[in-house]
Amino acid sequence: MKERDLFEPVKKLLEEKMYCKVYAEVANFDVVGLGNSYGIVVEMKRKLTWKLIEQAQNAIGLADYVFIAIPKPKTNGNRVATRYLKQDGIGVIYIDENCAYVHSWGKRHKPSRSLRDYVLPHHRLTTGGVKSGEGVTEYSITIDNIKDCLRFRRSNEGWMTVDEILEQVQTHYSNPKPSVMATLQAHWNKDWCETKVEGRKRYFRLKRKSVKEGISHQG
């Protein structure tokens, strides 16, 4: 069973039993569920590991409830790791024959920041557990089109406003301008996109390394 195969059972559990809207790959977390007054993070792996526990611990400041999700183990597993989970108030979800259920709830945390601040429209289109770059989504198509637009910008040293980008790029967003503005400033896009404010306008351009890589790929 691959990590992404865990997503659909977890998504169904969050929607049907915890009454959440479900998003994937939000702020480097596998699955996020948003209820009316609470947020849930679920980190998924094919087995219980210390890395999985560490990833779940990183969500404690953002989510009311934090879970790990793993296939149901055949034995009691690592008792020391289980003790750490209980100590940190992290719950456990088991997946058994494509059905997910809560094995232990953990405790409700008091997040210092809101998960909602990190959720963007494309997170509803993504599958949790999918490695970066795998698969094609409406979001990835939009990003590729924006990269191409910025790559071939010849004037103003490559800088473009969102309005200029949207003159050339069709996006999947229902409200394109604020969505593209937020997406291009998101930390997960900083490896290829840089931004500046000049004359009360915000500009974006492809980082020079990304421009060179694009040209070499085409050559």
Image (cartoon, helix red, strand yellow):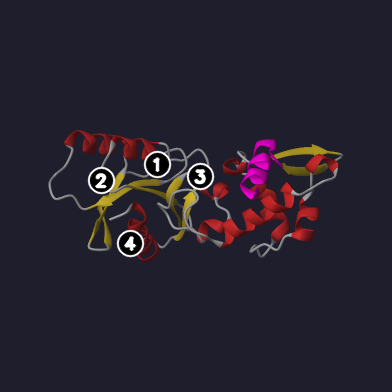
Q: Considering only vertical position in the picture, is 191 above or below 115?
A: above
Residue 7 image point, x, y percent: 37, 58
Rendered image quadrant of residue 157: top right
Element assignment for label 2: loop
**Left or right, residue 2 beside residue 170:** left
10 Å crowding of disc 1: few (<14), some (14-19), many (20+): some
What residue is rendered at 70% in x and 54% in y?
Answer: 178
Task: Estimate the x, y position of residue 73 in percent, counting from the top left.
Answer: 18, 49
Q: Which mark is nearer the camera, 1 or 4?
A: 4
Q: Quadrant of residue 189?
A: top right
Going by the numbered disc 2, the residue's amino acid type is Lys
Q: CA distance from mark 1 to mark 4?
A: 24 Å
Q: Can you tell which mark lies on residue 27?
A: 3
- Ranked by sequence position, the earlier of labels 4 and 3 is 4
Residue at image coords 46%, 40%: 111
What residue is pinned by disc 1? 109
The residues tagged by marks 4 and 3 sit, at their Cα atoms, a distance apart of 21 Å
Question: What amino acid does circle 3 point to?
Answer: Ala
Q: Say whether residue 217 is left or right of residue 83.
A: right
Give the mark, 3 or 2, whose residue is nearer the N terminus.
3
Type of amino acid under label 1: His
**Dots 2 and 4: beta carbons under 8 Å?**
no
- Which residues, given as a range, are shown in magenta? 206-219
* Label 1 or label 3, whichever comes before in sequence order: 3
For the residues bearing labels 1 and 2, Cβ distance under 8 angstroms: no
The residue identified by callout 4 is 9
